[in-house]
Image (cartoon, rainbow, N blue to C red):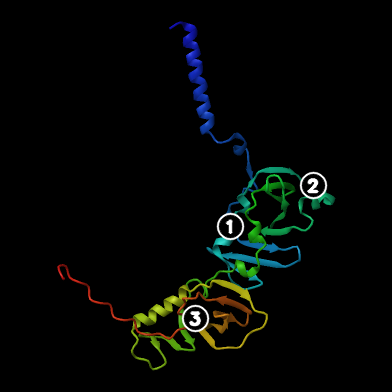
Amino acid sequence: MNNKLLINLLLLVLVAILGLFAWLSPDAEQQQVDRVTQVKPKAITTMLIKHPDGAVVSFERRGEHWFMRQPYALAANPVKMASLVRVVEAPALQSFPRPEQDRLGQFGLDRPIQLKLNGDEFLFGGIEPISGHRYLLFNGRLMLIVDRFQHLLSSTPERLLSHQLLPEGADLEEIKAPDYHLKRTQQGWALQSGQTDVGGDDLSKRVRQWRNAQALQIKPFEMAPEGAIVNVRLAGDTEIRYVIVTEQKRIWLIQPELKLGFLLPANSSLLQPITSSPPKPPAEKAGDA
């Protein structure tokens, strides 16, 4: 093999190695993409959403849990809150100087949705028609980000609430429903209706059902309705009162003070009388025919 052929082969191998390295390496343009901020999502403790019509929804984090402060003083949806705070680490796909005030309408920023995280203001504008990315105005810069926050920002307050009927880790003391009355005593949970054929496991099961109960849907009710009442008393004499409303064969639990309704799943047994579970059949022994 002559020297010229050997050199050509070596060059060919070198080109192949460089090509493979370039293919396996992250895209150079992607490496240069900056985040919107350097703030970590876990550092966010307050959140405020202001809509173009002036409506405001505000939240605060207490420990590991998010709570809505306005317009409802209730637990917030943890998954949706975790998604919203990730605005701070969204990649800024493109960044430009802030447009002049009279040009903000070109980017849908004349009537933006305003998001405040720990006091930092993010203004969400329209969609860039070619890329489909969302315009974001922050810290004097116009940016383009992936459009994955707008559906949450545009949500009604009810859609940002936790679907749990009772507070996280609630310590129940008493449940008074139309068809049963449960109360915790020193000996454990007991029915107050004189019924004696129900075991303690069945009573504890109903209490667990209440602790874990989640609504399929939450919606406002303009008028506080009338109907049968459910009273749930928690430790510390905190009481939650629901009005039972049947609407098109669906059962809603309405908190009249909040004028807020929680839709029960179709298979929910929360309001049904408590009955004794049928005994389990004895396990078959090996070799039984």
**Of all residues shown, which one is farthest toward the bottom?**
194
Is 107 left or right of 234, judged from the image as shown? right
* Disc sitting over residue 99 in the figure: 2
**What percent of the width, then of the height, locates residue 102?**
85, 51
**SS label for mark 3:** strand
Q: Residue 262: name its quadrant.
A: bottom right
**SS label for mark 1:** helix
Residue at (52% x, 63% y) in the render: 64
Query: Are the residues flagged by discs 1 and 3 in contact, CB closer than 8 Å?
Result: no
Is 204 left or right of 23, judged from the image as shown? left
| Residue 259 visible in the shown view | yes
Give me the C-alpha separation between circle 1 and circle 3. 31 Å
Q: Which residue is mark 3?
A: 234
**What percent of the width, then of the height, locates residue 44?**
60, 58
- Between 44 and 153, the one lying in front of the other is 153
Give me the C-alpha separation between circle 3 and circle 2. 54 Å
* Disc sitting over residue 10 in the figure: none
**What percent of the width, then of the height, locates residue 173?**
45, 83
Foreground tag (1 vs 3): 1
Q: Amino acid at mark 2?
A: Pro
Is 2 left or right of 244, judged from the image as shown? left
Q: Amino acid at mark 3?
A: Leu
Residue at (69% x, 42% y) in the render: 94
Q: Earlier in the sequence, mark 1 or mark 3?
A: 1
Q: Earlier in the sequence, mark 2 or mark 1?
A: 1
